[in-house]
Image (cartoon, rainbow, N blue to C red):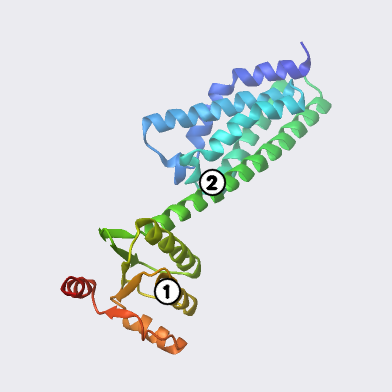
Amino acid sequence: MTRCEELYEFLVSKATELTERWYQEADKSSGVYASTNAEEIRTLKEQNKEFHLKFFQVLKENHDIFLKNFEEWILAVAKDESHQVTPINSIMKEFYRVRNHYLELVQQFTNETNGTEEELNNWTQVIIDTMDHVTIWFLEEYDRYSLERLHSHRELINELSAPVISLTPNTGLLPLIGDIDTVRAKFILDETLDQCAEKGLDRLFIDLSGVLVVDTMVAQQLFQLHESLRLLGIQTTLCGIRPEIAQTATQLGLSFENISISSTLQRALQASVLQ
């Protein structure tokens, strides 16, 4: 057995002990480390021990094979929901704390087996370089998945923020709530046109009572929405326009001369029934 293989066997024998020490010393103030759920703690410890067992293989495996074996752990944990809500600085702290535990054990093994200074320096460098590589790799995957997650959430929010509700076979309602920025306004324009055409509407009530603030670009998008619907043969009624929105529209010189306007959705619906 080579010296590297001896060190590998020594470290593997310490894996469970390492995990328990790691968990006891972990900063449990936030994220996945703060959980008090027994099942989540068990999973966290399993992930940590699996990390040790995969990491120690760097001492006996070809570098490319080592990285291939590590890939599954990196991708799985980087995407793990519990880790995704954990501050990245807390995760980095744990990587470097584990690295220090490894270096302590390597020193212990060298002392107990009368190893040379050269061996110690070589093993130390391997541990440091490999941990740096794995940490950066994890952070890249963590960041990539975070962006994908954010994009998916934004798409879901947009989809939920522009629902055209059918009131009758030919009449629909678009209730808008919350802040509308330029990106959301563009989405509302495109999505509303598609939904109205799909539902075969000839009249749409747009309720703006839940919209507190719009900028000039958004006001123009709302005006464009009306014009686009008009070209599709769909009559629109704007309801619940707040004073701030009315003022912005006036400052822009947007004309609502040919747009049906009602102070409230209730009054608009009542007037529609009487027509």
Which residue occupies 74% across, 20% down?
60
Q: Which residue is mark 1?
A: 222
Question: Residue 119's spot in the image, x, y percent?
Answer: 80, 25
| Position above or below: 74 against 155 | above
Quarter of the image with the N terminus is top right
Question: Residue 240's spot in the image, x, y percent?
Answer: 28, 76
Q: Earlier in the sequence, mark 2 or mark 1?
A: 2
Q: Which residue is mark 2?
A: 90
| Position above or below: 169 against 129 | below
Please indicate, yes or no, whether residue 79 appears anywhere in the rendered image. yes
Quarter of the image with the C terminus is bottom left
For marks 2 and 1, give the one nearer the viewer: 1
Left-right relation of 260 to 226:
left
Question: Residue 225's spot in the image, x, y percent?
Answer: 43, 71
User: In the image, what residue type sits under mark 2?
Assistant: Ser
Q: Residue at the right extreme?
A: 118
Number of on-image labels:
2
User: In the image, what residue type sits under mark 1?
Assistant: Leu
186 and 228: which one is in front?
Answer: 228
Which residue occupies 19% across, 71% down?
266
Question: Residue 236's spot in the image, x, y percent?
Answer: 33, 73
| Position above or below: 74 against 146 | above
Q: Quadrant of residue 136?
A: top right
